[in-house]
Image: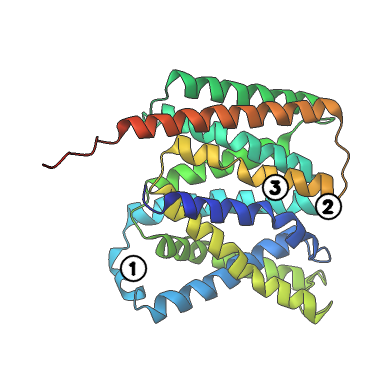
Amino acid sequence: MKGGVPAALLAYGLWGLMPLYFRLMAPASALEVVAHRVVWSLVLLLAVLGASRQLAGLRHRLSAPLLARFALAALLVSINWVTYVWSVTHGHALDASLGYFLLPLVNVGLGVLVLGERLSRAEWIGVALAAAGVAWLGWASPRFPWVALVLAFSFGLYGLVKKRATLAAAEGMALETALIAVPALAVLVWLGTRGELAFGHVSRELDALLISTGLMTTVPLVAFAYAAQRLSMAALGMLQYISPSLQFALGVFVLHEPMEPRRLAGFITVWAGLVVFSAAALAKRRRSRPAPSLKA
């Protein structure tokens, strides 16, 4: 548990602000942005691991089961990245927000069904309220929320895989990006041959932003991996509401996207569920702590 909550807050806070960041890269396609995220993240992680002399230890721990687990994690996070970048750069930011409101419910469900985690009655009430709010938001959406479903399930399963990881956060992230680095480079070459590569052809500012995706990708993902190994899936899931709440605020108050009363009602219901669940989880944690011993 130690350090898990601050790490989760850092990860979800940065992810909540990502729509503004990716909108600055509008000339680049979603595929190019994701490919740059992979390449520059790998460069940064290899530099960090090399400087800390952890690369040799990582090579000695590689095995077929470990590679299979992280290959699955890499596939899931790649699907999530492409879907998210496409959605926030093609007018589907609210669909992305709905997906990350749905994600905590997916995390809670995985925690209960796969990991055998147990919820109290009050926690179930909070989950039910949040689920009702998400269902209402899905119904109120003018189109089928496929973006939301892909984002929620891809990252929920990614979190489950990462929770069972046996590598440190930075090492695991380096292995994931290494496994998809070749396809990412192939995408950049393919875009270049088609004359659709923005990097090096639009502006130095855009080039700098694309390079910075390595840092902006690595920091929250490493923080998330650190938190996932220290928090329950239920706690991790409910903290995730920070990210879509920030996206909601950006959409309404900064990007000035329309917010109908029926959609607002769904968001309020989700927030009510978050409050109930968080209060119940905090009370349960306090009850589980051993009473301090009294010394004469």
Tell which of 296 and 232 is nearer to you: 296
Separation of residues labelled 2 and 1 (CA atoms): 43 Å
> Dot 3 lies on which element?
helix
- The vertical placement of 244 against 274, above or below, is below
Q: Which mark is residue 254?
A: 2
Left or right? Give the position of 69 relative to 198: left
Q: Which sits earlier in the primary sequence, circle 3 or circle 1?
A: 1
Q: Residue at (84%, 66%) from the top-left corner?
A: 27
Q: Residues within 10 Å of mark 1 (few under 14, many from 20)?
A: some
Q: Mark 1 or mark 2, which is nearer the start of the sequence?
A: 1
Q: Position of residue 134 (x, y in %)?
A: 68, 28
Residue 111 x/y as whole percent: 43, 33
What is the three-letter code of the residue carrying label 1?
Leu
Position of residue 256 measured from the top left corner of the image (x, y, whole percent)? 88, 47
**Residue behind mark 3:** 246
Left or right placement of residue 30 versus residue 114 in this view: right
Q: CA distance from mark 3 to mark 1?
A: 36 Å
